[in-house]
Amino acid sequence: MNGSPDLSVRIGRMNLKNPVMPASGTFGYGREFEGYLDLNKLGAIIVKGTTLRPRTGSYPRRTAEVASGMVTSIGLQNVGVEKFIEEKLPYFDGIDSCLIVNIGGHSVEEYIEVARILNRQERVDALEVNISCPNVKEGVMTFGVDPEVTRDLVSRIRDATGKTLIIKLTPMVTDIRLFAEICQKCGADSVSLINAPLGLAIDIETRRSRLGRNITGGLTGPAIKPLALYLVWQVCKSVDIPVIGIGGISAPRDALEFLIAGASAVQIGTWNFVNPGITMEIIEGIRGCMKDKGLARLSDLVGTFQH
């Protein structure tokens, strides 16, 4: 084919120049990576999870390396939404990639307040809602494992913001398709999956968790890719809104698998710590694959899985 393939994709009200973005919690507030890559070349930047008030996060020993990945318990450490707006947001005035803010909370009211505050910020293009946060009113179960609680939360956040709304789904449920369908019916523009499944690593000498007092954490990295890919494929068949694939992407081939399975875009997580320039390599890898196969547009690749 002549010329460069068109990698652009539309998600809600956002027009992304390409389908690649870093996953929340693995890219800081963006600025931390400016020495490793051109932030303007990303489809979008997703900053770390933001809550209503500042959070110090989990106890020390927050990460443990395991076979093909990590178990982590960061505890949503962040500066809080007001300091984010005051100290972090102005930096993005000089960046033309879309900006997505991941949000969390311990109550529906907290989520709604954060959404309302960020809705007033013109530079914020979208909200990604982490529904794997503990729901204190429901006995610390997570919001994302109960269909009715999810329906209430997504509906009320949708009412609170006109921004593009992405719901990040947990795999720790019986059927993730049900939750994706609920999100679509309640007005979400997109769903992203998967959030990290829970994992445990034990020190056989002390017989204690390698995460110390945190005990369990989220399992991330290449270890979860087959699970994430399967669930993305399932969800893509059950909803009409764009699906963003996450989980174990460490090379262009991994990202291509998610796109072929039906994902409209991908997020890169753990591998940002291994190779800070991995997102650039994946963008170029997708572009190269499309050129080799004579594909003019990203839509010519997305959802082409033969089964």
Image (cartoon, rainbow, N blue to C red):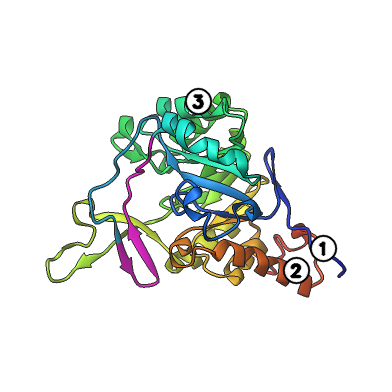
Of all residues, the one furthest to the right in this rendering is: 2
Q: Which residue is drawn at 72% across and 71% down?
A: 288
Q: Does the stretch in magenta take in 135?
A: no
Q: Distance between the residues labelled 2 and 1?
A: 7 Å
Distance of label 3 from label 2 (alpha carbons): 40 Å
Question: In the depicted view, which residue is nearer to us: 260 or 38?
Answer: 38
Q: Quadrant of the C terminus?
A: bottom right
- In reply to whether residue 77 is colored magenta, the answer given is yes
Place residue 123 in its image quadrant: top right
Q: Which residue is drawn at 30% across and 43% down?
A: 57
Label 3: few (<14), some (14–19) or many (≥20) C-alpha neighbours in 10 Å: some
* On screen, residue 253 above or below 21: below
- Neighbor class of circle 1 (other Cα within 10 Å; few <14, some 14-19, many 20+) is some
Q: Are marks 2 and 1 in contact (CB under 8 Å)?
A: yes
Sequence-earlier tag: 3 or 2: 3
Q: Residue at x 50, y 25 (%)?
A: 117
Q: Which mark is residue 290?
A: 2
Say whether residue 178 is visible.
no
Q: In which quarter of the image is the N terminus?
A: bottom right
At label 2, the amino acid type is Met
Viewer-proximal residue among 78 and 196: 78
Asked whether disc 3 touches disc 2, contact meaning CB atoms under 8 Å apart, the reply is no
Spatial separation of the CA atoms under disc 1 and disc 3 = 40 Å
In this view of the protein, can residue 267 be seen by the observer? yes
Element under label 1?
loop
Secondary structure at numbered mark 3 = helix
**Residues shaded magenta:** 64-79
Q: Which of marks 3 and 2 is in front?
A: 3
The residue wearing badge 1 is 296
Provide the residue designation for mark 3.
Answer: 117
Looking at the image, tell me whether mark 1 or mark 3 is earlier in sequence order. 3
Q: In this view, does 255 lie above or below 266?
A: below
